[in-house]
Amino acid sequence: MENLGASIVLRMEMITHGQTNGDREEIQEQFGRERTDGDREENLRTILPTMLQQFFDGHRIHCSCEGKRWRERYLDYYDDDYDDDFDFDDDTDPDRRAEVALQTRDGSSCKVITKECLLAAQREDIQRVMELLSLKEHQARTLLIHYRWDVDKVFEVLVEKGKDRLYAEACVMVQDDDNLNSTHCSSLALCEICMEEVPVYKMTTMDCGHCFCNNCWTEHFVVKINEGQSRRISCMAHKCYVVCDEDKIRNYVSEKDPDLAEQFDRYLLESYIEDNKRVKWCPSVPHCGNAIRIEYDEYCEVECACGVQFCFSCSSEAHSPCSCQMWELWTQKCRDESETINWITVNTKNCPKCHKPVEKNGGCNLVKCICGQSFCWLCGGATGFDHTWDSIRGHTCGRFKEEYTANVARATSEIMRYSHYHDRFKAHSDSLKAEITLKEKLQRKISNMEARELEIKNYDWVTNGAERLFRSRRIISYSYPFAYYMFSDTFLSEEMTKEERNIKKNLFEDHQQQLEGHIEKLSGFLEEPFDMYLEEKVMESRMRIMNLSKTADVLCKNLYDYIDNEILLHLGTTINIVPYRSKGADKAVELDL
């Protein structure tokens, strides 16, 4: 039973998260081992029917031809009543079902959450947990906030640790309402916060069983909301961390300050985005008001309904094949103009007294800082001001210092290296910005050819060629920051020897140059006035653009394959880059609720 449950959970994890082969092996190793813990087996027997029903009925699972086999194995342990719950269309060809499932998986895996459907999206996840565990809404919300709105994580902890541990880790207490209402039987009770006796009907008991007067609860809630702790307001009792009922919080706060109660509700609603690892705000400026929810790998690039493309992992602009860490370092380097520091290193010396950089503006090697300190330009040592044409009194430094010469050479080399990668990155980025205006020109060319009533009726090859040009230009542009850090002597210096680094760099540059050449050819053909050509020559331009578009697609994929299989695969340090998608960033579609 345990191995079956583990394999079902494993399969659901693999489907919902789209694991790679390596990830699947790790999960199989984790979940496929023998288990003898009776509590876990009981957990599986208790919750697997509900879990499977939710996963098969929900919109996070895609039922392929394997689904029927999972059901048959599963039903060996349960009554036949479940047989009608899972419909896999037995008359459908299995191969066709698998093909449909694959097409569904490769479709859009991200959704646009507008302001209007944000509440519905939040309630959908809350409802799943409420049904699974028979919880109240505030208890389900507390669980999800603790586990960052990851319903699958809640299921996993439930199977692995059981309900008690699941609730304890999230500070959730589940008690019957009868137990809470029967806490006090007398007409008066002592509030241990304000130490006053108040009528029982003016006291409130939370899920943890602690009972205090309504005034104290209200003041406690107001303070916590003002402190920004709206999402998890715990009990007032000493060392009690159970989260309070949000309905009670809302009722008491609204009586004293309705605006603060609205702020409390807004915080709870926004927690679905700000605490959810699978939902992020669109970084558009000005903000479009949309959020994006992904269903699978968080290392992906998405396109919001407003047209902004961004990296979901770091919320920066789409920068694949550059990793998030590399892109952050690169933008910081460009923003701060940190290469100025290298110029200072080459052309200045620090004063030995005030340590400010000093540039020599004459031929004499005895220089004087603005602070008044004199020092030798050759060695940087402090000296007096007395000197002759050939020496400084009391100072000699004629010995050769290899360390200083090496530092200057290293700084000069780094400047040239940075300039090489930055110039090419900027050139392709500028070309991409200029080519965006190409869309309007191409649309006019299509209109001209349609007006001529040529035999060619479909002009998708023009727009497809332009889209391929934009995507390929973006990739080649961001490949330069990737190369700058991946093949540097300092970044991951212990992962590759100098010889290995040079070999991989040369092969990477070969892929770069091939892609670069085809991008420039494609750009050139799209710029041509082919709308004015004779029909025979239009056909030639059509074939050239289509062939170049296909070749550019293949070369982009080859570049990514080389990065994945020949560079990143052999590193001990994990570097995550967004996988290559021929159609570009995953376009988010409106959430259907």
Image (cartoon, rainbow, N blue to C red):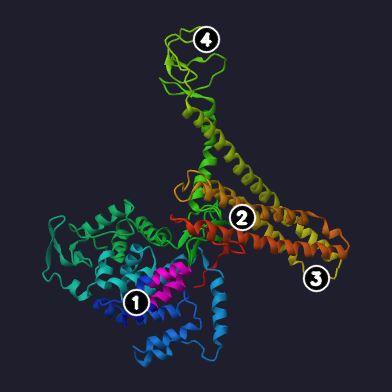
| Mark 3: amino acid | Lys
Indicate left or right for 53 with 443 as reference. left
Indicate left or right for 252 with 481 as reference. left
Q: Earlier in the sequence, mark 3 or mark 1?
A: 1
| Mark 4: amino acid | Asp
Which residue is labeled 1 in the image?
A: 132
Q: For this rendering, which residue is in front, 272 or 221?
A: 272
| Mark 1: amino acid | Leu
Q: CA distance from mark 2 to mark 1?
A: 44 Å
Q: Earlier in the sequence, mark 4 or mark 1?
A: 1
Q: For this rendering, which residue is in front, 77 or 531?
A: 77
Label 1 SS: helix
**Which label sits in the foreground, 4 or 3?**
4
| Mark 2: amino acid | Ile
Which class describes the residues within 10 Å of circle 4: few (<14), some (14-19), or many (20+)? few
Q: Position of residue 416 (x, y in %)?
A: 59, 37
Q: Is residue 576 visible?
A: no
Which class describes the residues within 10 Å of circle 1: few (<14), some (14-19), or many (20+)? some
Residue range corresponding to the magenta coloring: 8-28
Q: Position of residue 166 (x, y in %)?
A: 28, 69
Q: CA distance from mark 4 to mark 3?
A: 85 Å
Which residue is labeled 3 in the image?
A: 457
Disc ID at residue 3: none
Q: Earlier in the sequence, mark 2 or mark 1?
A: 1
Which residue occupies 56% across, 33% down?
Answer: 412
Q: CA distance from mark 2 to mark 4?
A: 58 Å
Cβ atoms at labels 3 and 1 below 8 Å apart: no
Q: Quadrant of residue 148?
A: bottom left
Q: For this rendering, which residue is in front, 489 or 588?
A: 489
Disc ID at residue 475: 2
